[in-house]
Amino acid sequence: MSRLTRLALAVLVLLPLSVVFAGGDTWKQRFKSNMRSEDSSVRYEAVRKLDTNDPDAVKAIVKVLKMMDPRVTNSRIRSGAVESLSKATSEDSLKLILKEMAKGKTPVREVMTAAIGRKKDPAYLDALRGALNDKQPIVRRAAIRALAGMKDKEAIDAILDRWAKEKRKKSFREWALCKTSLEEMTGKFISSFPVDWRNWWEVYREPFSFEEEWEDEDKAREEREKAEEEGRKAAERKSRTRSVDLSIKIRGAGAPILVLPMGGYDQAYYEPYLQSIQDICKIHYVTLPAIKEFKGLERGAGGIVKYPMDELVDAFEDLRKDLKYKKFAIMGHETTSMVAQRYVTKYPDSVSHLILVGAYSGTEAYRRILKAMIATGKKNKDSELEYLPLSILVDQDGKQLREPRDSDEAESLSRRSFALYFHYPHDLIVREMYDEYRLKAGVSNYFPEFDTFKERRATVPTLVMNGRHSLWSNVTDAQKIAKHYRNSQLVIFEKSTMMPFIEETEKFAAHIHAFFKKYPYRKK
């Protein structure tokens, strides 16, 4: 390669896309072509790499954001837009971003708010305050998260003002987000009442220093320990059992309930939203142990090690004894709904209530759901939806029916998998939750063969909760599960898939409250 050629390539790398593709192949043509790709990674990179100092690039992003087809745009694409827009510095582009932030369509306002927040510039505090008063909760949440990322006392002022306006029973997600944001910003755990925070802030606002609060590790640790003792922060505890050590976080007061996360995911995805039932439940969030922490497990076909369900429920029984509970409730989500059901079968006298969210009636039902997803993907010409279950299903030799062609496709399929847990997959929180709570290394999502209808028909009060439009589970299966248990209720959520405690928090909490009111927890 000649020196002249190397110099030309270097110039191409440095120039923005709007210049590189000037001429026969413009950046607009290339962008449109990439946005037609079936690979969401290509669409994501196309949006992320736009030069938003060009107002036309901002306009192109706005057009994409208005498209609500998950085959074109989703939370990942929208997060790419946030990253790209946050880098805009030209006056014309910033004016356009602020205009769309104030008057654009709802999905556009959410992204513009997040992009402005990422700048962490106090000059935009007024604009973010305006977004805090938006009529749409999704925009208000973006504004709260944006302000929470700023080390600015006026940002705390703004969140406190918003928190006082949010109604816990009507807008719990926003209410809880204000509270957790203040805790993250200040390192304090004052209480669950806005007035208490306001009173504290009025006294300590002037001397408060972000640097001092977070640099003094001893002071921060003392604050956390005191908050745990007083129940203002989740207390962490480890319990040694006969089969494996368990780590749990405890928060709330009332009926003890063991909460199991989806197979392989961090239990923390529950925490902001289950605050809605902490007034009646003492929640024990379980961290699922890694496979390597169990001893003597055998590998099956293809080297797959299945998650040891019976050993895990034995550990839960040891935990119950260690905590000195006569009984406790148990809640399983998605694949761990099978674990919760097995616990009831094996230790029926130890369970006060059984709650199943997005449940499966067994491993065969799970396989049927995956096959139905393949058919839906083919019908809709949605290759990611078709390939996702093929990458999960294995043949008799333990090999995937279709391996992702490369790491980019594997990442796209994984992200699409998580997005399907939401009825509204465009919400930026989907991307944020995936990045924070994604599958943990060493925790298998393969479970032993299981069939609800071969398990004990227990009489324990049972609540089965399912989303109407979920592709990961289905209402027919939920109905069969509810019918199997003799003392059960079935709740179908119309605006959720697998995450009703997030997407319909208030309705979810109302049903849990009513369930425990109908079947009170009795210590004896």
Image (tube, rainbow, N blue to C red):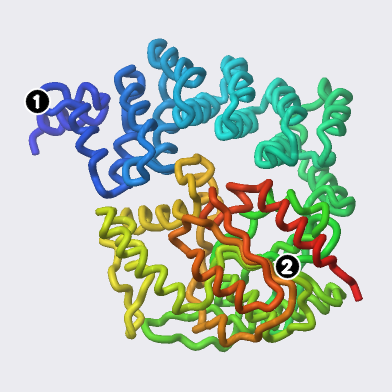
Instruction: Identify the residue position indicated by label 1 in the image.
Output: 24
Instruction: Tell me what residue is drawn at x 32 percent, y 73 percent.
Output: 400
* Quadrant in which the N terminus appears: top left
Q: Is residue 343 above or below residue 29?
A: below
In the image, taking residue 159 as reference, residue 10 lies left or right, namely left
Query: Which of these two is toward me, 246 or 344?
Result: 344
Return the x and y of residue 43 as percentages of the image width and height: 30, 41
Query: Which of these two is toward me, 297 or 70?
Result: 70
For residue 184, say whether it is visible. no
- Crowding around mark 1 (Cα neighbors within 10 Å: few <14, some 14 to 19, many 20+) is few
Return the x and y of residue 481 as percentages of the image width and height: 58, 74
Res. 139 image quadrant: top right
Q: Which mark is residue 258?
A: 2
SS at circle 2: strand
Looking at the image, is mark 1 or mark 2 nearer the viewer? 2
Mark 1 or 2, nearer chain start? 1
Question: Answer yes or no: do the residues labelled 1 and 2 have beta carbons within 8 Å?
Answer: no
Instruction: Tell me what residue is drawn at x 68 percent, y 78 percent.
Output: 486
Return the x and y of residue 193 as percentages of the image width and height: 83, 37
Return the x and y of residue 375 as percentages of the image width and height: 30, 64
